[in-house]
Amino acid sequence: MHINNSTNPYAYFTDQAGFPCWIPEHPIYREKNFYFIQPGDNLYYIAHFFNVSLQDLITENPGIHPYFLIPGQMISIPLPLPSEDCPQIYAVRPGDTFYHIAVNNDLSVKDLMNANPDINPNALLIGQKICLPKNKSRFRRLWRILAGMEN
């Protein structure tokens, strides 16, 4: 396969001075923490969105060129694991939001966000591990009943 007259099938040369963008042959993505590059994305935006450092994002993806991202390209997001003093760890499932996770575990969204300060609640990834704090409120179940969330 030849891309832009290159013999390397994993290199894509941009129109700017022939700089290659490397697409890794066998990328390693731990725990499904990956993201597909969208048109207009850059690594700074992606690092900011997922609340990770730019250097960690670059280190996690050695096969990509930081200035030449290809829409549709998959990159790994180096997400932090919950602290060791976390009472319970929850793995994010498809369709989960902080609200649904909080309600299903008798927590407030504020408590969940306080237990996971380094996580953007709008950027959850399937398989991502988050901390579920202990439920400290005696009145939480009463509030749920009054709000019509329980029978």
Image: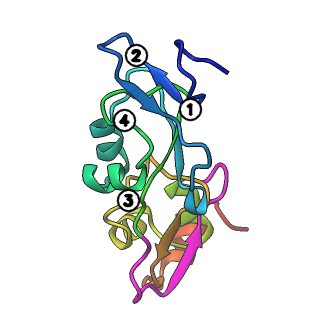
Which of discs 1 and 3 lies nearer the camera? The answer is 1
Residue position marked by numbered label 4 in the rendering: 65
Task: From the viewer's side, name the closer residue of 100 and 32.
Answer: 32
Q: Are marks 2 and 4 in contact (CB under 8 Å)?
A: no
Q: Residues within 10 Å of mark 4 (few under 14, many from 20)?
A: some
- Spatial CA span between label 3 and label 2: 34 Å
Numbered range of the magenta stretch: 81-96
Residue position marked by numbered label 1 in the rendering: 10
- Spatial CA span between label 1 and label 4: 12 Å
Q: Are marks 1 and 3 in contact (CB under 8 Å)?
A: no
Residue position marked by numbered label 3 in the rendering: 119
Prevailing SS of the magenta stretch = loop
Residue position marked by numbered label 2 in the rendering: 14
Looking at the picture, which amino acid does disc 3 mark? Answer: Ile
Task: From the viewer's side, name the closer residue of 122 and 5.
Answer: 5
Q: Is 92 a magenta residue?
A: yes
28 w.r.t. 43: above or below: below
Looking at the picture, which amino acid does disc 2 mark? Answer: Thr
Looking at the picture, which amino acid does disc 4 mark? Answer: His
85 w.r.t. 20: above or below: below
